[in-house]
Amino acid sequence: MKKGCTISALLIALFAGLNLADGVRRTPPPPREPMGRPTNHVMRQEARFATLRQALQRHPVRGTLGYLTDLPPDQLAADPKGKEDYFLTQFALVPWVLDARKADGPWAVANLRTAGSEARIPAGFHVVEDLGNGVLLLRKGPP
């Protein structure tokens, strides 16, 4: 009886070891990210808007910010990529609140991806800071 238990325990240990070795062999190595540029699009968007966060803190920006993009506000809701950019921008700029339909406030953020989109800047707004990569801080009023 004791000999049967010992053999059973050794067989269980052998199969457990083989199963563990097979699992380790099949597990792929972790992905390597290039240095300095995050591969996660959420982290890329946060890095892209980090300078805007600093600019918002430097200026007396309060309340809801207007949000401008390559798309008109009525098309933004129907475009999946545009909506994703809007929500990722909102996430990156918390606690400030973005409103794509608000063009009457004193401040706005422009998230422009294509050349020539500067023409979408509403009349009465001027660029306070061009933060690169199509990110602009806009203010209503004279320059």
Image (cartoon, rainbow, N blue to C red):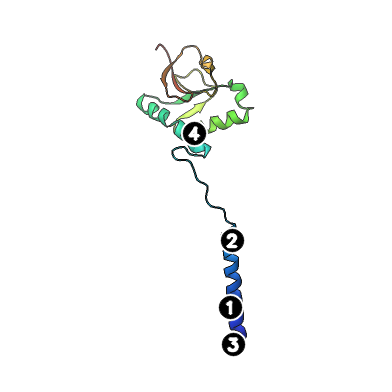
Residue at the extreme left of the image, as rendered: 58
Residue at the extreme bottom of the image, as rendered: 1
Image quadrant of residue 26? bottom right
Q: Which label lies toward us, 4 or 3?
A: 3
Horizontal and vertical percent for residue 19?
A: 60, 66
Numbered disc 2: secondary structure: helix
- The Cα–Cα distance between marks 3 and 2, rounded to whole angstroms, is 32 Å
Horizontal and vertical percent for residue 22?
A: 60, 63
Question: Which of disc 3 and disc 4 is earlier in sequence?
Answer: 3
Any part of residue 94 in sight? no
Numbered disc 1: secondary structure: helix
Disc 3 residue type?
Answer: Lys
The residue that disc 1 covers is: 10
In the visual, does 108 lie left or right of 6? left
The residue that disc 2 covers is: 23
Question: Which of disc 2 and disc 4 is earlier in sequence?
Answer: 2
In the visual, does 13 lie left or right of 135? right
- The Cα–Cα distance between marks 4 and 1, rounded to whole angstroms, is 54 Å
Residue 2: give its label.
Answer: 3
Indicate whether 19 appears above or below 87. below
Indicate whether 122 appears above or below 4. above
